[in-house]
Amino acid sequence: MPVDLDMLRVQLRAKQSTTTFAHTLGVVAAVELLAARYDIDREQARLAAFLHDVARDMETSELLKRILEYGILIDEIEAKEPLLLHAKVGAAMGRTLFGIEDEAVLQAVERHTTGAPGMTALDAVIYVADYIEPGRDSPGVDEVRRAAGQDLGHALVLAMNGTVQYLLRENRLVHPRTVDARNHLLREGMVVSHQG
Ligand SMILES: [Fe+2]
Ligand SMILES: [Fe+2]
């Protein structure tokens, strides 16, 4: 059953904070450009972009409640940095509440915070769009924007570098999946493939 994007958009507008909704629309705009540039299915990319932060504004208690409800397994780092959980919860909500059955879309949502080893081009587009959407102004974002127009894998590594640098500056935990994702990319010559 095709997912009604307009309905999803209306629900997000009602549930997300103004800031998160504006960010979501920015990510949708960014994936439109990246999907065209890297020959990625536009509908999958738009759907993942709309969905990616559906759980972003939830309180920790609500995230943990959903973790139990959906039977999601979490690790020690996720338990200590519960903000990370919005990615897994968002994917589970996509499946159960919005009827999304496309595993590639759900995977891209699930991977958008930490990344993961062996990211697909769709995963990469969502991760990079999340980093470079027009509302973002983190240090080095323009370099990632430039790279995103030329080489998706390179842009992905730069976005991960920026994320890790931010976590180091803030003295926060770095999820090992992010380190594995980045190492994997560098070992593979920063190539992302269309297949998972
Ligand atoms: Fe997010
Ligand atoms: Fe986001």
Image (spheres, rainbow, N blue to C red):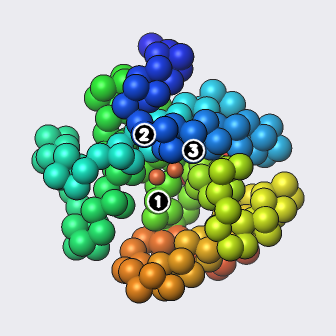
Q: Is residue 93 left or right of residue 193?
A: left
Q: Residue at x 72, y 66 (%)?
A: 141
- Whether 1 is drawn above or below 16: the answer is above
**Which amino acid does the dot numbered 1 rest on?**
Thr
- Say whether mark 1 is within 8 Å of ligand 1: yes
Instruction: Between label 2 and label 1, give the one nearer the viewer.
Output: 2
Q: Which residue is mark 1?
A: 113
Q: CA distance from mark 2 to mark 1?
A: 19 Å
Quarter of the image with the N terminus is top left
Please, is residue 7 above or below residue 129 in the view? Answer: above
Q: Amino acid at mark 3?
A: His
Task: Decide which of tag 1 and tag 3 comes sooner along the chain.
Answer: 3
Element marked by disc 2: loop
- Secondary element type, mark 3: helix
- Image x and y of residue 90, in percent: 36, 42
The x and y percentages for residue 3 are 48, 18
Disc 3 C-beta below 8 A from ligand 2:
yes
Image location (x, y in percent) of residue 123: 57, 51
Q: Which mark is residue 23?
A: 3
Q: CA distance from mark 1 to mark 3?
A: 15 Å
Q: Residues within 10 Å of mark 3 (few under 14, many from 20)?
A: some
Question: Can you see residue 128?
Answer: no
Q: Are marks 1 and 3 in contact (CB under 8 Å)?
A: no
**Residue 21 locus on image (x, y percent):** 51, 37
Mark 1 vs mark 3: in front: 3
Q: Residue at x 14, y 41 (%)?
A: 69
